[in-house]
Every structure is written in C-alpha cells, then in structure tokens.
Amino acid sequence: MAKMVVLQQPTKQPSISLLPSSFSDFNGTKLCQIQYKRKVGKPKGALHVTASSTKKILIMGGTRFIGVFLSRLLVKEGHQVTLFTRGKAPITQQLPDESDSDYSDFKSQILHLKGDRKDFDFVKSSLSAEGYDVVYDINGREADEVEPILDALPNLEQFIYCSSAGVYLKSDLLPHCETDAVDPKSRHKGKLNTESLLESRGVNYTSIRPVYIYGPLNYNPVEEWFFHRLKAGRPIPIPNSGNQITQLGHVKDLATAFIKVLGNEKASKQVFNISGEKYVTFDGLAKACAKAGGFPEPEIVHYNPKDFDFGKKKAFPFRDQHFFASIEKAKHVLGWKPEFDLVEGLTDSYNLDFGRGTFRKEADFSTDDLILGKSLVLQA
Amino acid sequence: MAALASSSSSLLFSSPPSKLPSPSLPRLSFSTSSFLSSSSSSSSLSLSHSFNAYPISTRRYSASSFTVQASAADKKKVLIVNTNSGGHAVIGFYFAKELLASGHDVTIFTVGDEGSDKMKKPPFSRFSEIVSAGGKTVWGDPAEVGKVVAGATFDVVLDNNGKDLDTVRPVIDWAKSSGVKQFLFISSAGIYKPTDEPPHVEGDAVKADAGHVGVETYLAEVFSSWAVFRPQYMIGSGNNKDCEEWFFDRIVRNRPVPIPGSGMQLTNIAHVRDLSSMLTVAVEKPEAASGHIFNCVSDRAVTLDGMARLCAAAAGLPVEIVHYDPKAVGIDAKKAFPFRNMHFYAEPRAAKDILGWEGTTNLPEDLKERFEEYVKIGRDKKPMKFELDDKILESLKVPVAA
C-alpha cells in the first residue's frame, strides 16, 4: 500500500482548515501508518530515509524558503506533507527550473492546514485532531509556540527544529561547535529556549543550527544585497577590514540535511550545525557574488561604522564579527555534506532568482550614499 | 482522535542521550548538546562520554587521546630526523616520548653537533628524558644519514627537518634503499596559497615554488607508504621558539600588547601533544595514513586579539591591546610580532576523517599550564628590552607604564 488518502488541495480554493470529517473519523490514522510495510524501491541518491514507513508530516511554515525545497523532497520521498500557515502567501509556487508536470504533481499532493501558530488553542486542537508522525518546525521563534504542538501530539515520533547558529556565545575560539557555550542573552534566545524545552519534554527532537542561508527565494537580503549593488555598478561598502569571516549555506543543502535527520536514530536528541564547507571573508563574499553574476571584480570600500549614524537602517547584512560553525558533526554522524560550494551556490541563486529580475527587497542605497559621500568616492 | 500507545514507534528513538555511534568508528561523536547558559535552565545536560571532558568555564572539549601499548608484532623501529632549532623542533621531542611510551623503538637524529650551543636550549636540553625512556640519540648531517645511524634499519622515518628537496632527498633516498616502510614528512601549512575562503583544507592549492612542496611531490613519487603533515604554530613545554611567551612577556610587565592590523586575523595554535598524537596514529595506522596530507593543527582557530586575551586570562592579569599599521609605523611586522599578519588558518579535517584523530588542545587551560612554567623558570622577572614595541607605541603616542 503506497500512500494514505491524499487530499487534493489546489491553491486557488479557499483553504479548508481541517480535513473532512470522514477522514478524521478514520480512527486508525496512526494505526494505519504503523502498519505500513517498508516502502519498496526506495529512490536512489543522497536521500536515505532510514525510517521505513511513509510518514504523516507537518511543516510549520514551509511556503517561503527552506520549506519550499524541503517539502518537495519529502513529497518525492512519498510522505504525506501538510503545511501549517496563515495562508497569506500562496501555499505553493512553481520554481523557475521546475517543469509544469513536476510542479502539478507536487501541488496536487501538498496539504494545507490554515491557522495562526500564535493561536495556541487552535494549534493544539487542530494538530491533535489530525495526528502527525513528524513535525518540522521551520518558522518557530519562541518556546511557547512549540508547547501546544508537543501537547497535541503525545506520540510524536520526531520534532525537527530549525534553530540557529546565532545562539552561540561569541568567542575568540572558532569555529562554533555544537558543544560550545550558548548565549542566553542573544537575539535568538527564543530558539535556545525552544531547544531547552524540547530537551526537557523528553521528546525525540533534532535541532538544526544553520548560519547564513542563501539560495533562490531567499527573503533575507544576503546575496541580494550584493547583487543589487553589482547590478547598479556601485561600489560595495564593507565595514572595517573586510576580513571578518562568515559562512553561507545553500538552502538546498540545508533541505537535504533536514531529510537526513528524518527517522534517523543518530539524530535523536542531537544538535547539528548545517552550513557550507568553507567559510568566507566579507571581501571574499563580494568577489564571489560578482563571479556568480558574471559581473566584473567589484570596487570595495571599507569604512568605520562608528563614523556614521545610520539610524534604524542596516548598512550591511552581516554581523560585524567572525561568525562561522563547524559542520564536521553532521558530516561524520549523518554522512551529509554540502553539494554547493560558494560560487556554485551563488550562481544557482543568481540564475534562478535575482538574475531573472526577481528579488524580495527593493534596492536601498541610502546608507551606501552616506558612506560614499563621506569617503568622497566617485560613483559610476 | 484515538491516541494510540504506538510503543513500537517510540522504541525507535528510545536510545539514551549518551549513546555513541557504532563501535567500529574510532572517533567520538558529540552525544548531546550542552547548554552552558548562566540562566537557571533545568535542562543542563552533561556530556556522557567516558572520556575526559575539560571542565572549563566557557566551553567543553571531548578529549580522546589515549596510548595503546604496541604488541610485539606492532612494535616499530622509528627514526626521527629532527631540526636543531625553530618552531618545529619540539615536535620530534614529544613524538619520540609518545612512541617510546607506546612501546616502540625510537632513535632521534638531531642535525648538527651534539656539543653545539644549540643543544643547550629546550627541547635538546631535555634529551635525557628520551634516553631514560629507552630512546637513542645521535647527531650528524642528514645527507649522510645511513652512516650516522651506523647501518641500523628502521620501519618508519619522520623527517622533521628539511624545508626543501636538497635537504630531504638524501634521507628519502636512503630510507627507500634501506627498506624503510613508511616515510612521514613535516611540511608546513604556510605553503597554502592565501584564500578568501578559509580554512585551508587538504587538497587546496599550494604555492608551487615553496620548498616543502618540492619535498612533498618527490616523496609521493618515490615512496609507496608516505604521509605529509602541515603544522602551524604550537605551544608546549620544551618549545625551542617563543610563542605564548611573547604575550606573557608584555602582560606580566604591564606593557601594552601591540598587534598589527585589526587583531581579527585568525591563526591556529595547537598544543604540541596534538601534533605528536596525530603522527603516532599515522604510525599505528599506516594503511589509513598512506598517500595522505594532513593539516597538523588543533581543531580551533583563535584571533590574534583572542590569543592576547587568553594569555592574560591564563596569567590572571589585565591586558591592553594596541593595534597598529606596520607600514605606517615603518617596521617589519615579521620582526615585531610572532604570527603572520593575515588569516592563517588550517583545519585538521583529513586527520579527523581518515585517521579518526581528535584534538585535545584547550588553549584556556593549556595556557594556564604554560604560564605556571613561565613563572617557575623566572622569566617574568627577567629584565627585557622592547625596542620594537617602543617604536610602535611611540608612533601611536601610547603611554607605557613605568
């Protein structure tokens, strides 16, 4: 038996918040899944899902960036995937390099559970009514958002959480490793609190800590910030020495990592840093973006941020410090490794997104002009 | 909705947090994340390895160095051709002692004369430790290695001396002709081409004209079982060249520490015991090591400013760091500062992946031990001149405490 009942969930229809009553009366939902035989003819390739049965999977979020790629991989693996979103963004979107038939296959299989995850009562009741084997929490920020999920699903097989390397305490010794001290005061303390909650609840969890994620559909202006300036033929203003070291991880590699931990005993109650194989200096990143987009080598202008008052605006998309994490644990324990190197990954992002004229944030060169004005650099 | 017991699925993941990976893997896995937050989190976890965890305030490392007594069948006869000075000299000293402790036969061949002044400095001044552990010490010219070792044969040779083919070729050729099975060479991570994408990883481009590269290439052509090790900087008792001492000298005298550039440059400073353990694993797993290059470094990088801070913390003293532009001041940073004025950062990925080696360097703790020795030998009281420092500080108009 290949799959459970799969609902058609076309995006144009008004979303139904719960599956039809006939389905939820299907008392044996969980029972059915447990009795599934091992799937015959597992797809080849890097995606080895060690758990044998098809799973009923809920993704919190999943319509914007990571989830777009992750949900496709999960559906391809034969799992039943539901996205929990408010429905503000389209549930699915066709990727630029995705064939019409692939897209319609995917679209016809993905399910939507419409709701606001901040409405904890709704989360608890709707999830408990559905019952899921695995939850991927891609957009959770605070521990209280996760509690109702755990309360609703006492038999949850695995809770897979997208945390952040931002939880690490700043250190003179790098790279950050999973065993390192974390910062309870960091901007990402909600992620930390969530990890603590997962540990204390005894649930089988896996926490993934990405560094900076990049790739097509990125809504955080990481590579986009450079591409805007390169396209405009503008100098790239980089704070201080430009030798600060950061690290980018391609979203597709991150999605693959999320698949690797699914049903994986070795990932049980473990934390993994997931990012690129190599790190990069700020100056180096500017050059890599130029290469990726086929632009000439950029003019880089260094400045002292203390000389300026940018108000609320961010003059540069990265933390002005070294920030990178070791992925050796994931490589050794999961057998995962990134497929994209930096220039390849940035090229992928450029070709499938910015290079086609799409981006999330309009260019805003106001902070650049402040910097360049003071530095008396002539613009092209 | 029926909440089923589904005990079968929960059993799948009932493994306790301390579970290590399958026994066939020699390396450790990080079994649980440890939250060392200062808040009263009730969920503080402990690393439940059976290995030592360094109980440091800010981080924990899992240590894994262990020595295994060589059985008679595994006992190797090892020749170490050792330089008579410089930052690498101490490697041979630790390696000799570790091999001897593991039951191997060791001869350490130091370049030059036994009576030379160079032999009065550490680690040579402590060679009695090698002898009392059963090792042999000889001196001479590596170009005549066969003569110097008086016809003895060896299973393994480590060349921890030559920086170019002219110096090492005679040793390699002799080793091959006399039936040496495994040849190890101490190269240098300094041969990596500078990169925008650190760290330096084995396989990355190297400077073709570097002397060490000539040796590495020749060795690979000529020997079947070879391994190359590329170190950076090291600390450890018996070091022939100053490393942390440079910082201690200034910190204990309440002098500012002048660091070129931004101070954000990353470097790699390992305890020499890590280099020795990596070499030892290669000797004990020759098939695994064969044909590979290994970055012989610790598994953490440190910034130059960070090193100053860690030295100060180890000394229990404050530190004032002053940055300067060597060109603007008109001094040669190579003379004024012990580390390269750029990112110089390699990671020991091949050693971890291929040899199952784990680093144990713990700079915060190791530097404490180094500082204790620094004081014990009275170096903190030694009168010193800081001419280059003074020149730098003068140009920056930084006052120095009397």
Image (spheres, coloured by chain):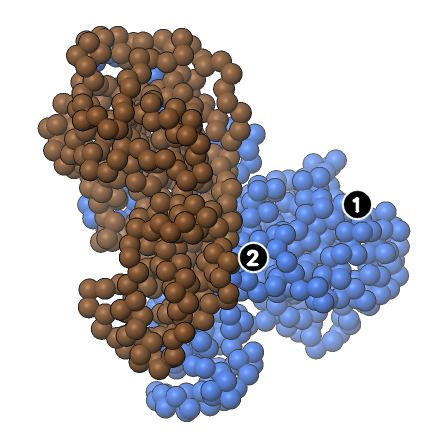
Chain colours: A brown, B blue
Circles 2, 1 touching at the beta carbon (< 8 Å) = no
> Is tag 2's residue or tag 1's residue first in the polypeptide sequence?
2
Dividing the picture into quarters, in which one does residue B70 lie? Answer: top right
Task: Determine the secondary structure under disc 2.
Answer: loop
- Residue B61 location (% of width, % of height): 43, 48
* Number of disc labels: 2
- Visible residue check, residue A159: yes
In the rendered view of the protein, which quadrant contains the C terminus of chain A?
bottom left
The numbered dot on residue B224 is 1
Disc 1 residue crowd, few under 14, some 14–19, many 20+, Cα 10 Å: some
In the rendered view, does B388 fall on the left or right side of A193?
right
Dividing the picture into quarters, in which one does residue A267 lie? Answer: top left
Task: Work out whether residue B355 or residue A141 is closer to the camera in this orientation and state it.
Answer: A141
Amino acid tagged 1 = Ser
- Residue B343 location (% of width, % of height): 50, 66
Task: Determine the secondary structure under disc 1.
Answer: loop
Task: Tell me if residue B198 comes above or below residue B45 in the rendering.
Answer: below
Q: Nearer the viewer, mark 2 or mark 1?
A: 2
Separation (CA) of disc 2 from disc 1? 26 Å
- Residue A178 location (% of width, % of height): 39, 45
In the rendered view, does A13 fall on the left or right side of A258?
left
Amino acid tagged 2 = His
Task: Work out whether residue B378 or residue B370 is closer to the camera in this orientation and state it.
Answer: B370
Chain of the residue under label 1: B
- Residue A243 location (% of width, % of height): 44, 67
In the rendered view of the protein, which quadrant contains the N terminus of chain A?
top left
Task: Tell me if residue B373 comes above or below residue B295 in the rendering.
Answer: below
Residue at horizontal 38 percent and vertical 75 percent from the top = A379
In this figure, which residue is indicated by the disc labeled 2? B200
